[in-house]
Image (tube, helix red, strand yellow):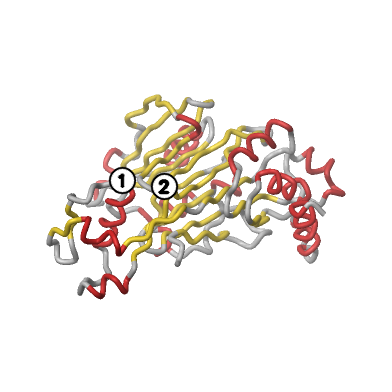
Amino acid sequence: MRRALHPYLVNDPFGDPGLFVDFLFERRALLFDIGDICALPPRKLLRVSDIFVSHCHMDHFMGLDWFLRICLGRERAVRLYGPPGFIDRVEAKLAAYTWNLLYRYENDFGLEVTELLAPGQARRARFHVRQGFRREQDEPLKIENGLFLAEPGLRVRCALLDHGTPCLGFALEETRHVNIWKTRLAERGLPVGPWLQGLKRAVLVGAGDDEAIAGPAGEPILLRDLRDCVQVTPGMKLAYVTDVVFSAANAAAIVELARGADTLFIESIFLDEAAERAADKRHLTAGQAGCLARAAGVKAVEPFHFSPIYRGREAELRAELERAFRGI
Protein backbone atom coordinates (compact mmCIF):
# COMPACT_ATOMS: atom_id res chain seq x y z
CA MET A 1 0.00 0.00 0.00
CA ARG A 2 1.46 3.36 -1.05
CA ARG A 3 1.60 6.13 1.50
CA ALA A 4 -0.22 9.34 0.61
CA LEU A 5 2.55 11.55 2.03
CA HIS A 6 5.98 11.68 0.42
CA PRO A 7 8.43 13.77 2.51
CA TYR A 8 11.94 14.75 1.46
CA LEU A 9 14.51 17.40 2.34
CA VAL A 10 14.65 20.29 -0.11
CA ASN A 11 18.46 20.50 -0.10
CA ASP A 12 21.42 18.28 0.79
CA PRO A 13 22.21 18.19 4.54
CA PHE A 14 24.73 21.03 4.20
CA GLY A 15 22.23 23.30 2.46
CA ASP A 16 19.43 25.47 3.82
CA PRO A 17 16.90 23.58 5.94
CA GLY A 18 13.57 22.73 4.38
CA LEU A 19 11.18 19.79 4.17
CA PHE A 20 8.80 19.29 1.23
CA VAL A 21 5.85 16.97 1.87
CA ASP A 22 4.08 15.94 -1.31
CA PHE A 23 0.55 14.51 -1.34
CA LEU A 24 0.91 11.77 -3.92
CA PHE A 25 -2.77 11.51 -4.80
CA GLU A 26 -3.64 15.22 -4.69
CA ARG A 27 -2.34 18.38 -6.30
CA ARG A 28 -1.04 19.58 -2.96
CA ALA A 29 2.10 19.85 -0.85
CA LEU A 30 3.27 21.32 2.45
CA LEU A 31 6.57 23.12 3.03
CA PHE A 32 8.45 23.37 6.31
CA ASP A 33 10.88 26.32 6.21
CA ILE A 34 11.45 28.37 3.10
CA GLY A 35 15.12 29.25 2.73
CA ASP A 36 16.87 28.35 -0.51
CA ILE A 37 14.08 26.63 -2.49
CA CYS A 38 15.66 26.82 -5.95
CA ALA A 39 15.87 23.01 -6.04
CA LEU A 40 12.06 22.90 -6.16
CA PRO A 41 10.69 23.50 -9.68
CA PRO A 42 7.75 25.91 -10.08
CA ARG A 43 5.32 23.05 -10.73
CA LYS A 44 6.03 21.73 -7.22
CA LEU A 45 5.95 25.15 -5.56
CA LEU A 46 2.54 25.75 -7.11
CA ARG A 47 1.26 22.67 -5.25
CA VAL A 48 2.13 24.20 -1.85
CA SER A 49 -0.95 25.12 0.18
CA ASP A 50 0.67 25.70 3.59
CA ILE A 51 4.13 26.90 4.66
CA PHE A 52 5.38 26.40 8.23
CA VAL A 53 8.37 28.57 9.19
CA SER A 54 10.41 27.67 12.26
CA HIS A 55 11.93 31.17 12.61
CA CYS A 56 13.01 34.04 10.43
CA HIS A 57 16.77 33.62 10.12
CA MET A 58 17.67 34.09 6.46
CA ASP A 59 18.36 30.43 5.72
CA HIS A 60 14.83 29.56 6.83
CA PHE A 61 12.87 32.48 5.36
CA MET A 62 14.54 34.12 2.36
CA GLY A 63 12.79 31.88 -0.19
CA LEU A 64 9.44 33.55 0.41
CA ASP A 65 10.41 36.20 -2.16
CA TRP A 66 10.93 33.58 -4.88
CA PHE A 67 7.75 31.79 -3.87
CA LEU A 68 5.78 35.04 -4.29
CA ARG A 69 7.37 35.57 -7.71
CA ILE A 70 6.13 32.14 -8.83
CA CYS A 71 2.61 32.61 -7.45
CA LEU A 72 1.79 36.16 -8.56
CA GLY A 73 -0.91 36.32 -11.18
CA ARG A 74 -2.52 33.06 -10.09
CA GLU A 75 -5.86 32.60 -8.37
CA ARG A 76 -4.84 30.86 -5.21
CA ALA A 77 -4.45 31.34 -1.48
CA VAL A 78 -1.55 30.11 0.63
CA ARG A 79 -1.42 29.83 4.41
CA LEU A 80 1.76 30.68 6.32
CA TYR A 81 2.54 29.92 9.97
CA GLY A 82 5.41 31.14 12.12
CA PRO A 83 6.69 32.28 15.54
CA PRO A 84 6.03 35.53 17.42
CA GLY A 85 6.53 38.58 15.17
CA PHE A 86 5.97 36.55 12.00
CA ILE A 87 3.13 38.68 10.60
CA ASP A 88 5.25 41.84 10.88
CA ARG A 89 8.12 40.13 9.04
CA VAL A 90 5.90 38.93 6.21
CA GLU A 91 4.42 42.42 5.96
CA ALA A 92 7.92 43.93 5.84
CA LYS A 93 8.88 41.64 2.94
CA LEU A 94 5.76 42.60 1.02
CA ALA A 95 6.33 46.31 1.74
CA ALA A 96 9.85 46.13 0.28
CA TYR A 97 8.47 45.94 -3.27
CA THR A 98 6.65 48.44 -5.50
CA TRP A 99 3.17 47.14 -6.35
CA ASN A 100 1.81 49.93 -8.57
CA LEU A 101 0.95 47.49 -11.40
CA LEU A 102 -1.02 44.99 -9.36
CA TYR A 103 -4.26 46.24 -10.91
CA ARG A 104 -3.26 44.42 -14.11
CA TYR A 105 -3.60 41.01 -12.45
CA GLU A 106 -6.98 39.43 -13.10
CA ASN A 107 -6.45 36.86 -10.34
CA ASP A 108 -6.30 37.60 -6.64
CA PHE A 109 -3.39 35.78 -5.04
CA GLY A 110 -3.53 35.94 -1.25
CA LEU A 111 -1.66 35.04 1.92
CA GLU A 112 -3.20 34.08 5.25
CA VAL A 113 -0.52 34.48 7.92
CA THR A 114 -0.75 33.04 11.43
CA GLU A 115 1.80 33.60 14.19
CA LEU A 116 2.01 31.85 17.53
CA LEU A 117 2.20 34.46 20.28
CA ALA A 118 2.41 32.13 23.28
CA PRO A 119 1.07 28.66 24.09
CA GLY A 120 -2.64 28.78 23.29
CA GLN A 121 -2.51 32.27 21.77
CA ALA A 122 -2.05 33.28 18.15
CA ARG A 123 -2.80 36.05 15.68
CA ARG A 124 -3.89 35.93 12.04
CA ALA A 125 -3.81 38.48 9.22
CA ARG A 126 -4.40 38.43 5.47
CA PHE A 127 -2.69 40.04 2.49
CA HIS A 128 -4.20 40.16 -1.02
CA VAL A 129 -3.00 41.30 -4.42
CA ARG A 130 -6.15 43.35 -5.05
CA GLN A 131 -5.55 45.28 -1.83
CA GLY A 132 -1.92 46.02 -2.70
CA PHE A 133 -0.83 43.47 -0.09
CA ARG A 134 -2.01 45.73 2.74
CA ARG A 135 -2.60 43.97 6.05
CA GLU A 136 -6.26 43.02 6.53
CA GLN A 137 -8.42 41.20 9.05
CA ASP A 138 -5.76 41.24 11.75
CA GLU A 139 -7.33 39.35 14.64
CA PRO A 140 -6.42 37.22 17.67
CA LEU A 141 -7.32 33.54 17.87
CA LYS A 142 -6.89 30.52 20.10
CA ILE A 143 -4.57 27.64 19.28
CA GLU A 144 -5.45 24.53 21.26
CA ASN A 145 -2.54 22.18 21.99
CA GLY A 146 -0.37 23.88 19.39
CA LEU A 147 -2.76 22.84 16.60
CA PHE A 148 -2.07 25.11 13.62
CA LEU A 149 -3.87 23.07 10.97
CA ALA A 150 -6.78 20.65 11.43
CA GLU A 151 -8.48 18.99 8.47
CA PRO A 152 -10.26 15.66 8.05
CA GLY A 153 -7.45 13.14 8.28
CA LEU A 154 -4.64 15.70 8.73
CA ARG A 155 -3.17 17.79 11.58
CA VAL A 156 -0.10 19.97 12.03
CA ARG A 157 1.00 20.84 15.54
CA CYS A 158 3.75 23.17 16.69
CA ALA A 159 5.89 23.51 19.80
CA LEU A 160 7.50 26.75 20.92
CA LEU A 161 11.25 26.15 21.32
CA ASP A 162 14.35 28.23 22.11
CA HIS A 163 17.10 29.17 19.65
CA GLY A 164 18.06 32.37 21.43
CA THR A 165 14.91 33.57 19.66
CA PRO A 166 11.51 31.86 19.60
CA CYS A 167 11.59 28.93 17.17
CA LEU A 168 8.89 26.43 16.23
CA GLY A 169 9.10 22.67 15.84
CA PHE A 170 6.37 20.91 13.89
CA ALA A 171 4.61 17.55 13.77
CA LEU A 172 2.47 16.47 10.82
CA GLU A 173 -0.02 13.67 11.47
CA GLU A 174 -2.39 11.78 9.25
CA THR A 175 -5.14 10.82 11.68
CA ARG A 176 -6.08 7.98 9.32
CA HIS A 177 -4.98 6.91 5.88
CA VAL A 178 -7.59 5.88 3.30
CA ASN A 179 -6.48 3.51 0.55
CA ILE A 180 -8.67 2.60 -2.44
CA TRP A 181 -8.70 -0.92 -3.89
CA LYS A 182 -8.50 -0.32 -7.64
CA THR A 183 -9.28 -3.96 -8.45
CA ARG A 184 -12.60 -3.73 -6.61
CA LEU A 185 -13.44 -0.50 -8.41
CA ALA A 186 -12.70 -2.24 -11.70
CA GLU A 187 -15.05 -5.06 -10.76
CA ARG A 188 -17.83 -2.45 -10.59
CA GLY A 189 -16.76 -0.81 -13.83
CA LEU A 190 -15.63 2.33 -11.97
CA PRO A 191 -12.45 4.16 -13.10
CA VAL A 192 -9.91 5.83 -10.85
CA GLY A 193 -9.85 9.62 -10.97
CA PRO A 194 -10.38 12.87 -9.04
CA TRP A 195 -13.81 11.69 -7.85
CA LEU A 196 -12.05 9.37 -5.40
CA GLN A 197 -10.96 12.38 -3.33
CA GLY A 198 -14.63 12.91 -2.49
CA LEU A 199 -14.88 9.27 -1.41
CA LYS A 200 -11.81 9.62 0.81
CA ARG A 201 -13.11 12.83 2.39
CA ALA A 202 -16.46 11.21 3.13
CA VAL A 203 -14.74 8.29 4.89
CA LEU A 204 -12.43 10.58 6.88
CA VAL A 205 -15.28 12.76 8.19
CA GLY A 206 -17.28 9.67 9.19
CA ALA A 207 -20.11 9.96 6.66
CA GLY A 208 -22.92 7.42 6.99
CA ASP A 209 -23.71 4.60 4.59
CA ASP A 210 -26.76 6.42 3.20
CA GLU A 211 -24.73 9.48 2.21
CA ALA A 212 -24.12 9.86 -1.51
CA ILE A 213 -20.91 11.03 -3.14
CA ALA A 214 -20.36 12.17 -6.73
CA GLY A 215 -19.18 9.34 -8.96
CA PRO A 216 -16.79 9.61 -11.92
CA ALA A 217 -19.44 11.25 -14.13
CA GLY A 218 -21.05 13.21 -11.30
CA GLU A 219 -23.69 10.55 -10.67
CA PRO A 220 -24.59 9.89 -7.00
CA ILE A 221 -23.24 6.69 -5.44
CA LEU A 222 -24.18 5.62 -1.94
CA LEU A 223 -21.23 5.24 0.39
CA ARG A 224 -22.42 1.77 1.46
CA ASP A 225 -21.86 0.55 -2.11
CA LEU A 226 -18.19 1.53 -1.95
CA ARG A 227 -17.26 0.48 1.58
CA ASP A 228 -15.48 -2.69 0.49
CA CYS A 229 -13.36 -0.66 -1.96
CA VAL A 230 -11.86 1.29 0.95
CA GLN A 231 -9.16 0.33 3.44
CA VAL A 232 -8.55 2.58 6.45
CA THR A 233 -5.23 2.32 8.29
CA PRO A 234 -3.37 4.41 10.90
CA GLY A 235 -1.79 7.47 9.34
CA MET A 236 1.81 8.61 9.07
CA LYS A 237 3.44 11.00 11.54
CA LEU A 238 6.40 13.23 10.67
CA ALA A 239 8.26 15.65 12.94
CA TYR A 240 10.55 18.53 11.94
CA VAL A 241 12.92 20.19 14.40
CA THR A 242 15.76 22.58 13.62
CA ASP A 243 17.78 25.37 15.23
CA VAL A 244 17.31 24.69 18.92
CA VAL A 245 19.63 24.72 21.92
CA PHE A 246 19.97 21.49 23.92
CA SER A 247 18.13 22.33 27.15
CA ALA A 248 15.79 20.51 29.49
CA ALA A 249 12.80 22.59 28.35
CA ASN A 250 13.53 22.10 24.66
CA ALA A 251 14.18 18.39 25.12
CA ALA A 252 10.86 17.84 26.91
CA ALA A 253 8.93 19.76 24.25
CA ILE A 254 10.67 18.00 21.35
CA VAL A 255 10.14 14.52 22.81
CA GLU A 256 6.45 15.23 23.33
CA LEU A 257 6.04 16.73 19.85
CA ALA A 258 7.83 13.90 18.01
CA ARG A 259 6.64 10.99 20.15
CA GLY A 260 6.09 7.88 18.03
CA ALA A 261 6.78 9.61 14.73
CA ASP A 262 7.50 7.50 11.67
CA THR A 263 10.36 9.88 10.84
CA LEU A 264 11.94 12.71 12.80
CA PHE A 265 13.81 15.24 10.66
CA ILE A 266 16.21 16.94 13.06
CA GLU A 267 19.22 19.21 12.81
CA SER A 268 22.61 17.72 13.66
CA ILE A 269 24.99 20.59 13.12
CA PHE A 270 28.04 19.58 15.17
CA LEU A 271 29.73 16.49 16.56
CA ASP A 272 29.56 15.96 20.32
CA GLU A 273 33.22 17.00 20.59
CA ALA A 274 32.02 20.53 19.71
CA ALA A 275 29.17 20.55 22.25
CA GLU A 276 30.31 23.85 23.79
CA ARG A 277 30.33 25.50 20.38
CA ALA A 278 26.90 24.05 19.64
CA ALA A 279 25.53 25.45 22.90
CA ASP A 280 27.05 28.87 22.19
CA LYS A 281 25.36 28.92 18.77
CA ARG A 282 22.11 27.49 20.19
CA HIS A 283 22.24 24.33 18.06
CA LEU A 284 22.20 20.55 18.58
CA THR A 285 25.00 18.06 18.16
CA ALA A 286 24.42 14.82 16.27
CA GLY A 287 24.59 12.87 19.52
CA GLN A 288 22.04 15.13 21.20
CA ALA A 289 19.72 14.78 18.20
CA GLY A 290 20.03 11.00 18.37
CA CYS A 291 19.23 10.97 22.09
CA LEU A 292 16.11 13.07 21.51
CA ALA A 293 14.98 10.75 18.72
CA ARG A 294 15.48 7.73 20.98
CA ALA A 295 13.60 9.34 23.87
CA ALA A 296 10.71 10.17 21.55
CA GLY A 297 10.51 6.56 20.36
CA VAL A 298 10.53 7.50 16.68
CA LYS A 299 10.87 4.77 14.06
CA ALA A 300 13.47 6.57 11.95
CA VAL A 301 15.54 9.72 12.21
CA GLU A 302 16.83 11.86 9.34
CA PRO A 303 19.60 14.36 10.23
CA PHE A 304 20.21 17.58 8.30
CA HIS A 305 21.58 21.14 8.62
CA PHE A 306 25.21 19.99 8.96
CA SER A 307 27.85 22.64 9.61
CA PRO A 308 30.07 23.28 6.55
CA ILE A 309 33.12 22.56 8.73
CA TYR A 310 32.21 18.86 8.35
CA ARG A 311 32.23 18.69 4.56
CA GLY A 312 33.89 15.41 3.74
CA ARG A 313 33.00 14.12 7.23
CA GLU A 314 29.26 13.62 6.81
CA ALA A 315 29.58 9.94 7.74
CA GLU A 316 30.91 10.89 11.18
CA LEU A 317 27.83 13.01 11.94
CA ARG A 318 25.49 10.26 10.79
CA ALA A 319 27.37 7.59 12.74
CA GLU A 320 27.32 9.63 15.95
CA LEU A 321 23.59 10.24 15.63
CA GLU A 322 22.93 6.57 14.90
CA ARG A 323 24.89 5.40 17.96
CA ALA A 324 22.90 7.71 20.22
CA PHE A 325 19.62 6.74 18.55
CA ARG A 326 20.35 3.01 19.03
CA GLY A 327 21.59 3.53 22.57
CA ILE A 328 25.06 2.21 21.78
Image quarter (top left, top right, bottom left or bottom right) of the N terminus: bottom left
In 3D space, how far apart are the residues under numbered discs 1 and 2 (Cα atoms)? 11 Å
Q: Position of residue 82 (x, y in %)?
A: 50, 38
Image height check: is 272 above or below 180?
above
Q: Position of residue 207 (x, y in %)?
A: 25, 47
Q: Position of residue 20 (x, y in %)?
A: 50, 57
Residue at 44%, 44% (x, y): give it: 155
Residue at 37%, 60% (x, y): give it: 231
Mark on residue 103? none
Mark 2 Cα-neighbour bin, 10 Å: few <14, some 14–19, many ≥20: some
Q: Secondary structure at mark 1?
A: loop
Disc 2 residue type (three-letter):
Leu
Image quarter (top left, top right, bottom left or bottom right) of the C terminus: bottom right
Mark on residue 205? 1
Residue at 60%, 61% (x, y): give it: 11
Q: Is residue 244 left or right of residue 134?
A: right
Sooner in the amino-acid sequence: mark 1 or mark 2: 2
Q: Secondary structure at mark 2?
A: strand
Residue pointed to by mark 2: 154
Observer-nearest of 132 and 184: 184
- The image quadrant of residue 250 is top right
Residue at 74%, 52% (x, y): give it: 325
Disc 1 residue type (three-letter):
Val
Say how many tags the image has: 2
